[in-house]
Image (cartoon, grey):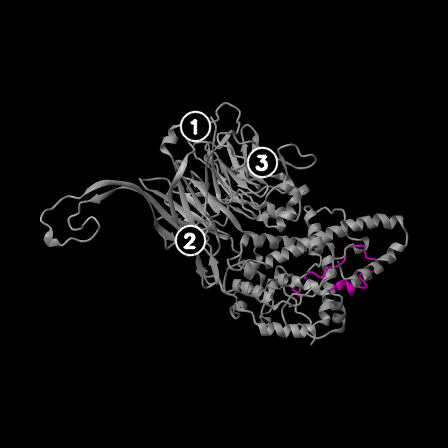
Amino acid sequence: MEAFSCRCYQFNLLLVMLFVTADIISTVEFNHSGELLATGDKGGRVVIFQQELESKNQPQCRGEYNVYSTFQSHEPEFDYLKSLEIEEKINKIRWLPQKNAAQFLLSTNDKTIKLWKISERDKRPEGYNLKEEDGRYRDPTTVTTLRVPVFQPMDLMVEASPRRVFANAHTYHINSISVNSDCETYLSADDLRINLWNLEITDRSFNIVDIKPVNMEELTEVITAAEFHPNQCNTFVYSSSKGTIRLCDMRASALCDQHSKLFEEPEDPSNRSFFSEIISSISDVKFSHSGRYMMTRDYLSVKIWDLNMESRPVETYQVHEYLRSKLCSLYENDCIFDKFECCWNGNDSVVMTGSYNNFFRMFDRGYRQDVTLEASRESSKPRSVLKPRKVCTGGKRKKDEISVDSLDFNKKILHTAWHPQDNIIAVATTNNLYIFQDKL
Amino acid sequence: MFPKGTKRKFSDSREEPVAGGEDVNQSSLAAVRMLSSYSLQRQSLLDMSLIKLQLCHMLVEPNLCRSVLIANTVRQIQEEMTQDGTWQIMTQALSAANAAAQCSADRLVATEVLCRQTEAAQGEQVPKPFPVVGSEGCPAEEVLEEEEAAAAEVGMTMSTVSPQAPTSYLPGTFGMDPCWEEEETGEDDDDDEEEDSEECGSGSEGEERERDSLVEDTRTAEQVFGTFEIKNPAPSPDPALEELFSDVDASYYDLDTVLTGMQSVPKMGPYDLLESLSSHGPSPLSSSTSCRSDLNELDHIMEIIVGS
């Protein structure tokens, strides 16, 4: 759906829904139709929201989502061998393309991936011959006639059941999962290895990337994110803590340690500092829907790469360049290690990512415009368009501007998601989920 | 701020070269001031990084990406200090210090090297040596800056490599790091806690499914980092060391709880920092240790240090 066909992109966003969650949100993901929105939290729970049917047809409130299903996906575990806890926090959720009435999603914590089936039940069979309605068995001698059980309608029930558990394949912490376009396989990536799974087989996985050095003391680089190409089932990319992205072709060899392409931008010598490597570490990589481009997020910027050009990105957007002079403080309070995600809109014309102070940024690639918006209750008045925010970098602070020193670094937006077809976005602050839609 | 004795000593030695020709010394003094401020900032960044690496939350496995990035930063600083020449000077200072000390137990030690560096203080126009780390596997020492707050302030302004104007340090303090202090195990309880968490974290990791050797991670970090080995303290009362420690203000012992996170049972040998970074393969070093600290060992060490 081309929502911004001919006019200048105005970024008019309205707050439609605000959910307060019990625990810190750790991942947000729309399904392929956009009808469902899944969130995972630090407590191992998954909450699925469903778009309201009525609002789907009313353009004014298409962004109305309500809770559809809630379930406990992962529980905390204890690794007795290492005497360490395994967090139940959901790191990533990825939906499978819908094949039948049921929906399937993969959710993962640090060590274990689970395939969940979410299905609706709105009828139940009644009129058994051998069982009473409450389930007790009837005495066969009392059965004098036979009848055919029939389905009777019942209140809608949404059930989530774990169908597969993919465990014990990762020594290090899983940071990414990605479903292949073949819909039969998926990859899971931890700090040093990437494994390929078949969705049907849980006791075996193939290791396709291994960057663990023989001598762990020589370890200087880790895998930070990985994703399958949206169309080419043989292609995937993975990013590293040194700011490189490697594109691999699974047809080339079983173990894809040798990349087909290496994407890396040469460092700007004028910006060199002790923090250069840390801020170059890529926290997220996402293919465009078209499959022609990919986007990477490092600490200060978002970069768009053309898959045909490895030497440098085709576009670079500064998310919060004013933080460059604060890197030492951000290193001290560990904020420099925050992993921000990024996302594309449905037609790849706009990209979005989060920042601090509950700010999030949108960059229109075509019109070369960008905006800073805030996800907070104070700034989201009902039925009024979100006001752009501005950070004052130095000198006199204008009215409505915020100075860099007033930014709240505890309020960070790490997870954002964009509806695959419509201009509806989901923005997660620490434990609030905001759903915005554009004003038509 | 700094123990007065040390500062005065250094200033005294510093004044001699300045007393001579003025204009030349003024401009070179300014340049040296900038260099020294940069060195201070670099030093504080190094200290901050080392502390970060040690203070992992050992209940859950530490974030490997974060650890690797911090370790790379430390390595970068170390390389730059090697190129500066400060590394070599430091190593020499360390060797001199080590010669007087005997190794018996593993622990963190920071020494007031500058009190002993009479030859280095004469006419030196380059940043002073820091007793930070030694390369080539020689025993290294953990460094503690007394004025962590002040240093942190200085550190906060450093985001690029280019040196900045000096802050509140006197000209006489150019290139000099704030005085070190001995990390005493004053707070045994805190030490135990830190040790608990550290050792729990470096426990065995047997989940590896591949054929990786169980021994590969057990080598010390010294080959790569060279800097994270725990220095063995002086067990016997050394007159030079007594003089060293006499200036140390007891109130700074609170910082020990931070740094003694690296405490380990003395018999273990150098602590393998990477054990905490990786979760691979059980370490023969840590496999023999329990998660509980050995209080008797710590008491023993305390007696030796205090010289009782």
Q: Is residue A177 visible?
A: no
Q: Which residue lies furthest to the bottom in this view?
A: B308
Distance in Å between CA atoms under marks 3 and 1: 31 Å
Circle 3 crowding by C-alpha within 10 Å: few under 14, some 14–19, many from 20: many
**Letter of the chain that mark 3 sits on in the rendering:** A
Q: Quadrant of the N terminus of chain A?
A: top left
Rendered image quadrant of residue B293: bottom right
Apparent side of residue A88 relative to residue A213 in the rendered image (left or right): left
Residue A79 higher or lower than A320, as above or below: below
Q: Which of B290 and A204 is in front in this view?
A: B290
Distance in Å between CA atoms under marks 2 and 3: 35 Å
Instruction: State the SS at label 3.
Output: strand
Marks 3, 1 in one chain = yes
Instruction: State the SS at label 1.
Output: helix
Residue carrying label 1: A60
Residue kind at label 3, given as amino acid type: Tyr
**Letter of the chain that mark 1 sits on in the rendering:** A
**First to last magenta residue range:** B112-139
Instruction: State the SS at label 2.
Output: loop
Apparent side of residue A243 relative to residue A346 in the rendered image (left or right): right
Residue carrying label 3: A317
Residue carrying label 2: A112
Say which label, 2 or 1, has the lower sequence index. Answer: 1
Residue kind at label 1, given as amino acid type: Gln
Circle 1 crowding by C-alpha within 10 Å: few under 14, some 14–19, many from 20: some
Principal secondary structure, stretch drawn in magenta? loop
Rendered image quadrant of residue B145: bottom right
Circle 2 crowding by C-alpha within 10 Å: few under 14, some 14–19, many from 20: many
**Letter of the chain that mark 2 sits on in the rendering:** A
